[in-house]
């Protein structure tokens, strides 16, 4: 229940209507704003930034009206406060906004109406403390050839404010910000002051209080006020450099709570499990890598997947039995691109590179008789073992410190690919319980031999 | 259950301690609770602390060597038509809320999980489930639980001739999760599932595998990279590591499952119906078909010395000023081996020759495991003393700036 939630802060919006014969003030009447609100929240990731637009219907008296807006206990950036009249049919002018002296967390708009009317306004502002993040669960099929991939979005509200029945949009993309909204929200003066702010003890105190508030804020929450027969759909649309997730209908996000909504559910995405050896990426550990493509396969490929944590499980029967395969964190996955989830090592599968023969050949000397170059010739063996109970595909990438080398006498691989001038990869698949050795000879040209080498095509 | 293909796991219950099953029905504490189910079509949200719990039909704990316990509870939820709110909460245990998953095992047209919310205390989840009708629906709730893992320890008993080992493996379940489990199926792999109870703060050891008469080879393992080359003149002679080499193969009575890593205590029969403790080592992970060496101690009775008895330069190439640029070396190293025991022994001698080299007269068969590592398996009769000379040529040794290319690292 709402009162059960921890909610230390509140937002008050009042209209102070000054009914007066301009320019003399005749008095002040207070009128509560219409309760019919339409709140739209746009939450960014990874920036701690949320744009809140609160739309209301406002009765105005002829003359100057004051609209008072206070936000004590919230994490609203006062420099972002904006009021706009959205009903063009009314003759209403917003003349100024004040932050009265001696007050905190209070702004007053002066709005002039040519005649008594009811108009529509939007009050918008930035706030910090509302976060969203993607989260994925992947369920590997028994034969590991497919995954059921379910994407979630999780929304956390630590802003100090409850947002009832809000329309929520989530933004995927990096946004350029000059200031952190959380810093702006904690300044003692909305737009700062001429003196260096670092000398202001009050400001430091405010920062400390804000930090304590953030650290002590309880976690999460979104709640639904009405039952729905199906999970809310999340519409995904592109907008400039961003991707926008719009949650169907409205959602209440109460301070302290978090909620998780299904973003998509792709039931049978083709997947591959390969074992990757790449000492520059993973050290000498052979890593089990689950990969899939964000393509038009089983519900994917229509939108990018924002970076997030994948929890991967392996189905072991049809009755819900599964094992935990590991976690992996990925970056943003554009449409059409492959995602790779490193799930850690498997002790039953191994790759052991070794030098089986080493020779220095083709020694060259300069006209003074000094050694000036030679060929470093190494015969290499990659001993590969698959003691697991399933076929295992391997991608073994090797690196050379310099590009002056050639590779010859390759054997044992299914496929060989030279990635660039210093990297090459072997591809091989082993049946369960088998071993294999990939052999090759690598000749590196040292000293003058770099310029005298006899080209040997890489195969 | 592939009993015939995996004797390690087949024997789990056969070798369970007497009385184990009789303990299974004892009490357990359930700090985790599945809260009440509210049929609240259209009602406002209300989280309920009431704990009218549907009983767990079955609990599986999946331990597959990752030291992360995946708990899977099968329960039957009495769902009513409309929206049902289910409060899953926990106390005094650590559960990753991101990894809690509810599988309704039902047609999505009939039952759908609408949303998951997490209250401010973060030790609970609230699922909203839509059901098209009143039904008792089996579900599986899965979550990762910290503080629960398993170890394996081995006990090996060698016969007095050290030809065979009786190997016993014990599974140790450690539960410091805050949760107690009664009659729970512990799943290690498809062939290893067994039921037991496990209380919070309880450590339970279960004998799950015995292999008697496992053939082993006792070896003495001298490695020139770590052992002194002149032990007679060394201030401290550490002795030569000795132990048993075992094979995880069907010929040896194993070979159907991996041997997981674990501490291994090794005893030996003394021939008088008593045993002595020989030593302990860590059994490495030994996949099916692999081998392992279990060290029990060091022997002072086998003596190995290595001496360089000849070195000459050849093919010396100089520059115009007479400075040496490149040269070869012909080297003879002598291994002096002595078995002071009254029984024959098998010595494994490992040594390295760095750089580019060619064998000339190696004196004994050997295996070259990489470009610089040589392994000799040498039989020494009782009280035998002999020497082996290795003569080889190190080729193209550079001086000056190019000297850094004389040796390379293995694997690169």
Image (cartoon, rainbow, N blue to C red):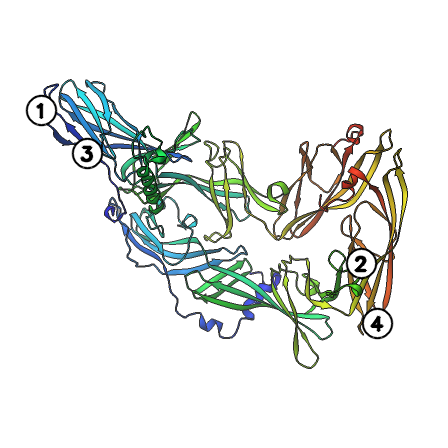
Task: Tell me the SS state at disc 1.
Answer: loop
Task: Tell me the SS state at disc 3.
Answer: loop
Q: Are marks 4 and 1 on the same chain?
A: no
The subunit carrying tag 1 is A
The subunit carrying tag 4 is B
List the residue tagged with mark 4: B383
Q: Earlier in the sequence, mark 2 or mark 4?
A: 2
List the residue tagged with mark 1: A26
| Percent x, y of residue B405 | 77, 40
Judged by depth in the image, the label closer to the viewer, 3 or 4, is 4
List the residue tagged with mark 3: A35
Q: Are marks 2 and 3 on the same chain?
A: no
**Residue, x 84% and y 63% (percent of image)?**
B336
| Percent x, y of residue A206 | 31, 39
Q: Give the Cα distance between marks 1 and 2.
A: 109 Å
Q: Are marks 3 and 1 on the same chain?
A: yes
The subunit carrying tag 2 is B
**Residue, x 37% and y 62% (percent of image)?**
B30
Q: Earlier in the sequence, mark 3 or mark 1?
A: 1
**Residue, x 53% and y 65% (percent of image)?**
B172
A394 relative to B343 in the view: left or right: left
Badge 1: how crowded within 10 Å, few (<14), some, or many (20+)? few
The N terminus of chain B - image quarter: bottom right
Judged by depth in the image, the label closer to the viewer, 1 or 2, is 1
């Amino acid at each position: 229940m709402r009162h059960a939630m921890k909610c230390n802060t509140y937002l008050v919006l009042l209209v102070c209507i000054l009914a007066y014969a301009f320019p003399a003030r005749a008095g002040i009447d207070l009128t509560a704003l219409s309760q019919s609100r339409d709140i739209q929240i746009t939450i960014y990731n990874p920036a701690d930034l949320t744009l809140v637009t609160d739309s209301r219907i406002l009765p105005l008296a002829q003359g100057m009206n004051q609209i008072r807006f206070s936000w004590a206990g919230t994490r609203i950036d006062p420099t972002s406060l904006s009021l706009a009249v959205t009903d063009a049919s009314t003759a209403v002018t917003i003349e100024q906004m004040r932050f009265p002296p001696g007050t905190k967390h209070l702004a007053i708009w002066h709005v002039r109406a040519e005649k008594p009317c009811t108009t529509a306004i939007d009050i918008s502002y930035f706030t910090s403390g509302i976060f969203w993040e993607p989260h994925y669960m992947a369920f590997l099929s028994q034969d590991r050839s497919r995954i059921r991939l379910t994407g979630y979005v999780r929304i956390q509200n630590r802003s100090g404010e409850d947002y009832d029945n809000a329309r929520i949009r989530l933004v995927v993309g990096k946004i350029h910000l000059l200031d952190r909204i959380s810093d702006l929200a904690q300044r003692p003066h909305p737009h700062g002051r001429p003196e260096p702010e670092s000398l202001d003890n009050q400001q430091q105190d405010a920062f400390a209080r804000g930090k304590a508030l953030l650290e002590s804020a309880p976690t999460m929450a979104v709640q639904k006020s009405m039952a729905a027969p199906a999970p809310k759909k999340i519409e995904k649309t592109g907008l400039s450099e961003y991707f926008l997730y719009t949650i169907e209908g409205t959602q209440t996000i109460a301070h302290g709570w978090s909620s998780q909504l299904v973003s998509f559910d792709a039931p049978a995405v083709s997947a591959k499990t390969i074992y990757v050896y790449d000492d520059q990426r993973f050290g000498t550990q052979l890593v089990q890598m689950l990969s899939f493509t964000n393509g038009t396969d089983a519900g994917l490929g229509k939108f990018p997947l924002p970076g997030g944590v994948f929890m991967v499980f392996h189905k072991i029967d049809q009755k819900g039995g599964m094992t935990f395969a590991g976690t992996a964190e990925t970056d943003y996955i554009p449409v059409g691109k492959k995602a790779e989830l490193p799930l850690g090592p498997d002790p039953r599968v191994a790759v052991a590179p070794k030098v089986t023969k080493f020779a220095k050949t083709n020694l060259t000397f300069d006209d003074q008789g000094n050694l000036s170059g030679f060929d470093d010739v190494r015969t290499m063996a990659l001993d590969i073992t698959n003691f697991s109970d399933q076929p295992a595909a391997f991608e073994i990438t090797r690196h050379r410190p310099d590009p002056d080398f050639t590779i010859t006498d390759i054997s044992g691989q299914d496929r060989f690919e030279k990635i660039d001038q210093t990297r090459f990869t072997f591809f091989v698949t082993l049946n369960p319980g088998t071993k294999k050795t990939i052999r090759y000879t690598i000749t590196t040209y040292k000293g003058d031999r770099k310029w005298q080498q006899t080209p040997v095509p890489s195969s | 259950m592939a009993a015939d293909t995996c004797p390690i796991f087949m024997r789990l219950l056969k070798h369970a301690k007497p009385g184990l099953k009789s303990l299974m029905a004892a009490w357990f504490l359930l700090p985790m609770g599945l809260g009440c189910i509210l049929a609240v079509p259209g009602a406002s949200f209300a989280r309920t602390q009431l704990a009218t719990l549907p009983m767990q039909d079955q609990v599986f704990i999946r331990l597959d060597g990752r030291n992360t316990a995946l708990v899977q509870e099968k329960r039957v939820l009495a769902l009513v038509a409309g929206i049902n709110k289910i409060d899953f909460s926990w106390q005094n245990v650590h559960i990753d809320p991101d990894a809690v998953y509810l599988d309704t095992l039902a047609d999505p047209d009939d039952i759908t999980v609408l949303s998951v919310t997490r209250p401010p205390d973060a030790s609970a989840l609230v699922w909203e489930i839509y059901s098209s009708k009143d039904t008792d629906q089996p579900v599986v709730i899965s979550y990762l639980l910290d503080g629960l893992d398993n170890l394996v320890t081995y006990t090996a008993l060698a016969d007095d001739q050290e030809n065979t080992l009786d190997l016993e493996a014990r599974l140790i379940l450690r539960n410091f999760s805050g949760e107690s489990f009664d009659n729970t199926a512990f799943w290690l792999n498809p062939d290893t599932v067994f039921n037991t109870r496990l209380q919070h703060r309880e450590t339970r050891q279960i004998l799950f595998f015995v292999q008697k008469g496992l053939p082993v080879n006792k070896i003495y393992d001298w490695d020139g990279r770590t052992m002194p080359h002149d032990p007679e003149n060394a201030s401290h002679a550490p002795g030569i590591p000795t132990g048993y080499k075992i094979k995880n193969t069907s010929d040896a009575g194993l070979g159907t499952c991996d041997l997981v890593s674990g501490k291994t205590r090794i005893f030996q029969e003394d021939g008088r119906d008593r045993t002595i403790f020989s030593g302990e080592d860590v059994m490495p992970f030994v996949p099916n078909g692999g081998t392992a060496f279990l060290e029990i101690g060091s022997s002072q009775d086998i003596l190995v010395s290595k001496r360089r008895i000849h070195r000459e330069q050849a093919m010396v190439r100089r520059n115009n000023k007479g400075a040496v640029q490149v040269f070869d070396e012909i080297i003879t190293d002598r291994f002096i081996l002595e078995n002071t025991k009254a029984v024959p022994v098998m010595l494994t001698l490992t040594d390295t020759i760095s750089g580019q080299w060619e064998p000339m007269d190696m004196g004994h068969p050997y295996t070259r495991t990489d470009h610089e590592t040589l392994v000799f398996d040498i039989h020494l009769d009782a009280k035998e003393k002999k020497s082996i000379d290795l003569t080889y040529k190190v080729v193209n040794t550079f001086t000056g700036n190019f000297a850094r290319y004389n040796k390379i690292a293995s694997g690169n």
